[in-house]
Image (cartoon, grey):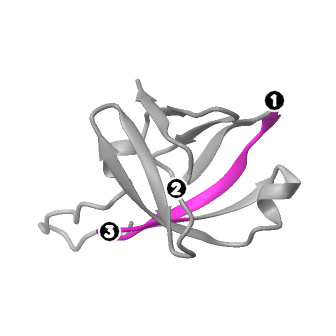
Amino acid sequence: TTDPAPGATPTATAADPLIGKTLTGPQATFVFNTDGTVGGSFRGDPIVGVYTASATEVCSTYTAPANFADLGEICSKPAIDGNQVVFNRRDGSTSPAYSISG
C-alpha cells in the first residue's frame, strides 16, 4: 500500500483482513506481513516473497521456493468466508482453501 497524505485516511486493501494472520492450506502456510513481505512454508521449504494490494486484489512475487519463483507475479482476489479464504486468480484458477488463524 502507499502511505496516505498527512491527515488522509489509509485506503483499505484486499490484503488487510489477512495481514498478520497465518493462512494454513493442504501443502502450504502463508503469512502476509505488515512490511509487504510474504513468509511461510511449502512442503517444509521456506516461502520468501513480497506482495502489493489494491482494494480488490493481492499480487505476490516469490524468490523461494523455486517452483513459486518460476511463476512470476501472481494476482488474485481473496474470497473470505468466515475463517477460510480462497484466492481466485487472474488466470481463472483457484487456490485451495486456507484456514485463517492468529
Q: Which is nearer the N-term, disc 2 or disc 3? A: 2
Which residue appears at 21% of the width and 63% of the height?
10
Check disc 1 and give the amino acid type.
Gly
Instruction: Classify 83 as above or below 72.
Output: above
For mark 3, give the secondary structure: loop
Question: Is 19 a magenta residue?
Answer: no
Location of the N terminus by quadrant is bottom left
Which residue appears at 83% of the width and 49% of the height?
65
- For the record, the magenta segment spans 44-59
For mark 1, give the secondary structure: loop
User: Badge 1 is on which residue?
Assistant: 44
Residues at marks 3 and 1, CA–CA distance in whole angstroms: 30 Å
> 10 Å neighbourhood of mark 3: few (<14), some, or many (≥20)?
few
Residue in front for this viewpoint, 97 or 23: 97
Question: Which picture quadrant has residue 66?
Answer: bottom right
Res. 31 mark: none
Which residue appears at 64% of the width and 41% of the height?
39
User: Is residue 17 found left or right of 85 in the rendered image?
Assistant: left
Dominant SS of magenta comes to: strand
Residue 5 on image: x %, y %: 22, 74
As drawn, the residue found furthest toward the top would be: 102
Residue 35 on image: x %, y %: 50, 51
Residue 2 on image: x %, y %: 37, 70
User: Badge 2 is on which residue?
Assistant: 36
Q: Which is nearer the N-term, disc 1 or disc 2? A: 2
Question: Is 45 a magenta residue?
Answer: yes
User: Badge 3 is on which residue?
Assistant: 56
